[in-house]
Image (cartoon, rainbow, N blue to C red):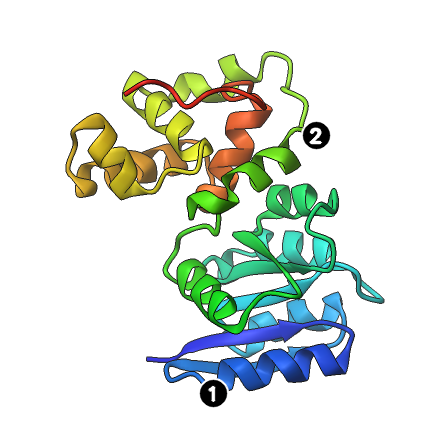
Amino acid sequence: MSIRVLLADDQALIRAGFKMIIDSEPGFQVVAEAADGREAVDLARTARADVVLMDIRMPRMDGLEATRRIGADDNLAGVRVLVLTTFENDDNVVLALQAGASGFLGKSVEPEDLLHAIRVVAGGEALLSPKATRGLVSRFLTSLRPEPGGSSRALDLLTEREREILVLVAHGLSNDDIAERLHLSPLTAKTHVNRAMTKLNARDRAQLVVLAYQNGLVRQGDALPEG
């Protein structure tokens, strides 16, 4: 089965470039193109896309609001949003992660990295783990202030093991990394991550990271806990 991609960008040349890269790769297909956020939301509902490549700055409705609407629509629960940005230190990237995006890419991304990113988010993961992105994500999330009392409200739902694993997810570790570090099987690590997502009502790992920072469980500059 092909991974079905929706391109949302107000610049036709950028859409054309991404379309050429995506359609040339076996197992990938661009199923629709949108020139603004409102059109992106409508097409997400009709084109049966797996992944939306979403620009942030677009007319009529920007990519942030479009991402929120896709994330809030139960009928689009399986649709993943991958945010495209010209400036990778854009504060809007933080807001996109909070809105439900599964990751982000700079528009200057290399073709192989673009295809890899689409595969990652289509598979239900967040584009936060390769470790190379860990510092970048952490820097974006420093603008999030811990919510007063947030830890007692949200994180008390988690077991000690789930809290421990949430910290490792927030540091950018994959399920395999977590399993090796905690002497678990990869399946057990994945089960703990999935339970934490369910308890915290998180769509994916990206939202787990946001919640970890919002609730003060992880802060900028924290070292990776000793194994």
Question: Mark 2: which amino acid?
Answer: Ser
Give the residue displayed 50% in from the left and 43% down from the top: 206
State left or right for residue 29 relative to residue 66: left
Compute the Cα span from label 1 to label 2: 38 Å
Q: Which mark is residue 143?
A: 2
- Local packing at callout 1 (Cα closer than 10 Å; few below 14, some 14-19, many 20+) is few
Q: Position of residue 205 (x, y in %)?
A: 44, 43
Q: Position of residue 87 (x, y in %)?
A: 73, 54
**Which residue does the numbered mark 1 point to in the structure image?**
24
Task: Give the mark nearer the N terminus: 1 vs 2.
Answer: 1
- Local packing at callout 2 (Cα closer than 10 Å; few below 14, some 14-19, many 20+) is some
| SS under mark 2 | loop
Nearer to the camera, 172 or 166: 172
Residue 39 location, quadrant = bottom right
Question: Mark 1: which amino acid?
Answer: Ser
Nearer to the camera, 127 or 72: 127
- Residue most extreme to the right: 59
Q: Position of residue 19 (x, y in %)?
A: 58, 83
Nearer to the camera, 41 or 53: 53
State left or right for residue 188 relative to residue 132: left
Q: Is residue 70 above or below residue 171?
A: below
Q: Which mark is residue 158?
A: none
Name the image quarter holding the C terminus. Answer: top left
Q: Is residue 173 above or below residue 148?
A: below
